[in-house]
Amino acid sequence: MADKYDCVIVGGGIAGLQAAIQLGRYKRNVLVIDSNDGRSNLCKNYQNILGWPEGISGQTLREMGRQQAKSYGIQFAEERVLQCEKEIEGFNVITNSANYEAATLLFATGVVDRIPPELQQELYPCMGKTVYVCPDCDGYEVNNRRVLVLGSGKAGASLSLTLTYWTNDITYINHDKKEIGPLADTLMQKGITYKEAAIKKIIAEAEMLKGVILENNEIVYGERGFLAFGGNKVRTELAHELGAELLENQHIIVNPRTKETNVSNVWAAGDIVAHSEQAAVAMGEGLQAAIWIHKRLLEQEEKNNF
């Protein structure tokens, strides 16, 4: 027989953990299933979160969140969910090693940034320290610094223009050499150096970006880096298979008040929801979803008692 839970949370990042903590405080029987390869694992330093003026790493936040959730009896499984099936009452959650029954579901599966495989090993140690992906989170960190935008096509060009708010020393390297059209003129007008060349090697020391070596062996130096390769993967397949409505960009549409999807008893929170790719926003959405999940469970329990 499958284990039964009040709620199964798919995804153990910032949104999933905050929801788990709140549901634990409601004394709910909850399982968090996490594949442990989420975006927050990569960020070495969030510096725009209340209470952490010196910053805190995503890994530390996750570890602290897990321990806090476990103190309320929340259970964890490090697995990958393969499928979620709707049943007469609740859901069947299938992983590669087990089946779990849930009265409610919360998807907090996040987004995977597209980083070319050949650059990952050298870039990952710098993520959140000297290399960033979100200007709203970390644009301040490049204030008046020499910045390299490593990207592809129009995505990289657009981010380069956004960063001119903080610095005038920007070089955009179009690694994939994709067409940028009229944006080439705009980059020139803004004083952004543009190079259409593949990156052969990242130059970094002790998590500090120093520059890159291009395919023609040219060295381009920089103090900070931003990534904008486009084509990020929004992990909404499981929710969509259950009937959750998506926007064209594959983010999930939710009720803004409750975070419930159009599928009854299915919620979503964090980066998979439209325009919420901030750690602090993910926390809030996870908490908000948990409140309404608890309300729904109370309703179900009252019906079952009659």
Image (cartoon, rainbow, N blue to C red):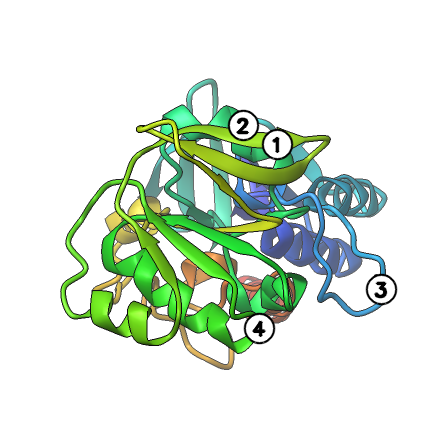
Amino acid identity at mark 2: Glu
Residue placed under numbered mark 2 in the picture? 122
CA distance for labels 4 and 2: 25 Å
Whether residue 276 can be seen here: yes
Mark 2–mark 3 contact, CB under 8 Å?
Answer: no
Q: Is residue 167 left or right of residue 93?
A: right
Vertical position of residue 130 compared to residue 297: above or below: above
Identify the element where label 4 is drawn: loop
- Out of 55 and 6, give the one closest to the viewer: 55
Amino acid identity at mark 1: Ala
For discs 1 and 3, the disc positioned in front in the rendered view: 1
For discs 2 and 3, the disc positioned in front in the rendered view: 2
Mark 4–mark 2 contact, CB under 8 Å?
Answer: no
Rendered location of residue 86, percent (x, y): 32, 47
Residue placed under numbered mark 1 in the picture? 204
Amino acid identity at mark 4: Trp
Identify the element where label 3 is drawn: loop
Q: Kindly identify which numbered label has been placed on residue 53.
A: 3
Identify the element where label 1 is drawn: strand
| Earlier-in-chain disc, 1 versus 3 | 3
Q: Is residue 111 left or right of residue 11?
A: left
Identify the residue at horizontal 75%, vertical 41% (top origin). Answer: 66
Residue placed under numbered mark 4 in the picture? 166
Identify the element where label 2 is drawn: helix
